[in-house]
Amino acid sequence: MADDLTAPLGQEAKKKRRATLPLFVPQAAAGALGLSVVIFLLWAATAEDPFGGEPMAVVLVDPGALNPAKTAGDAPQPGKIETPSSYAGLEQTPGPAPGTKTVTIIDGTSGKREEVVIPAGPGAASPRAGSVSAGATPAAAPMTQLLETSRHGPIPKIGPDGTRPAEAYARPVKLAEGKPDGPRIAIVVGGLGIGARGTSDALVKLPAPVTFAIAPYGADLSRLAARARAEGHEVLLQVPMEPFDYPDNDPGPQTLLTTLDADQNVDRLYWLMSRFQGYVGIANYMGARFTASEPALSPVLRETAKRGLIYLDDGTSPRSFASQLAGANNLPFAKAEVVIDAVPTPVEIDGALARLEALAREHGIAVGVAGALPVAIDRIAKWAKAAESRGFVLVPISAVATGGRSAEDRRQKS
């Protein structure tokens, strides 16, 4: 405004022009930024960065300690696969305290390493699968004389002296002192080894006579089975079998199928049997179609009997041939009469346990099955605390499995 008043009449004031960047400069900056993003994405997809995704923890393995004969120059190189002979000194090398783990924390920026010892948790098993630390129950380790090598790994067999795994890994029935032997109830909790919470709850809350059925797909199954047995539980292997709505309802890898021949199903059975050791027998997981097919089921039960195991039918399929085929093969057999958590609510589970008691009082023996649901584990644990006071004896599955006859067959003949 001041410029307009002081400017001479008839002359326009010259306006100052602002300095502006040429049009191509912003475009060039945007292009450079975009190119940088593309280069970063390509690097992230192709680069092998050992520190990417920090924080990370790796188990400390010193090749020189594992085998003193190896020099520092012989340490394994990235991408190189060492042969088993490279670790010949493993079993002779003293390790950390049982149950502890030594890990190395790596700084993803600087590469600095820091060794940390993680103490063992309560009741932790030995860190080496199949080994027994000082003070552990020896029976928790699989017996080598009861193992046979298959192409998939060790599987059960009857020992040279005729000892059967079902007998060797069975748990004795403990009766209350001064009390007569009352009606027997066996409870099997399955699906262990997959869900961390259910497995942990079962180990902590359920009494020793409850049998654990372990699924073949979990991690560190040998250690889980050893811990379960060390705490007094009998163990079963759950074998996935074809349901009627397969493959829409798929039990998992290596499922036994009616469309496979006997040799193929037996080979799959060997794979499943090799997942861990120390079990008294096997139990079907699903399998309504498979157990209803006599040609498919017969070779599997024949192989089960040949290896000195028992078979548990979970009782969910009324069309199962398991009872008849078990008798024909002299296979120790048990069948569940009550699915405890068919309706997984506290009220329904308590009702199922009451029905199990009624069957036990009427026939002397009753078998129930349940999944590793927190609600089922809680109700079974609470029921078990009071069962003895009501005159019942909670027993492992081997105590009710007989030579090819189910509890229902025994009742009909009694």
Image: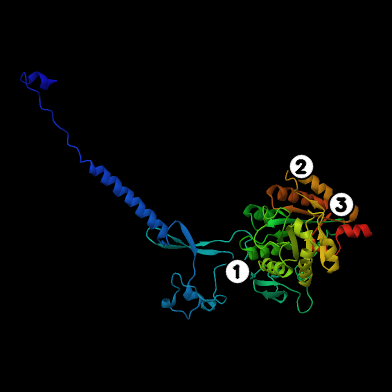
Q: Quadrant of residue 106?
A: bottom left
Q: Amino acid at mark 2?
A: Val
Q: Which image quarter is the C terminus in?
A: bottom right
Where residue 41 appears, x then y in whole percent? 39, 54
**Residue at the image position 76 percent from the left and 46 percent from the top:** 349
Residue pointed to by mark 3: 359
Q: Position of residue 52 (x, y in %)?
A: 42, 58
The alpha-carbon separation of the residues under discs 3 and 1 comes to 43 Å
CA–CA distance in space, label 1 to label 2: 42 Å
Task: Mark 2: give few (<14), some (14-19) or many (20+) Cα within 10 Å.
Answer: few
Q: Earlier in the sequence, mark 3 or mark 1?
A: 1
Q: Residue at x 48, y 74 (%)?
A: 63
Secondary structure under the numbered disc 3 in the rendered image: helix
Q: Which callout, 1 or 2, points at the residue further toward the start of the chain?
A: 1
Nearest to viewer (mark 1 / mark 2): 2
Which three-letter amino acid code belongs to the residue tagged 3? Leu
Q: Residue furthest bottom?
A: 69
User: Helix, strand or loop at disc 1?
Assistant: loop
Q: Which residue is mark 1?
A: 128
Instruction: Name the residue beneath numbered marker 2.
Output: 347
Query: Which of label 3 and label 1 is nearer to you?
Result: 3
User: Circle 2 sits in a helix, a strand or a loop, which is it?
Assistant: helix
Outermost residue to the right: 414
- In the image, farthest residue toward the left: 8
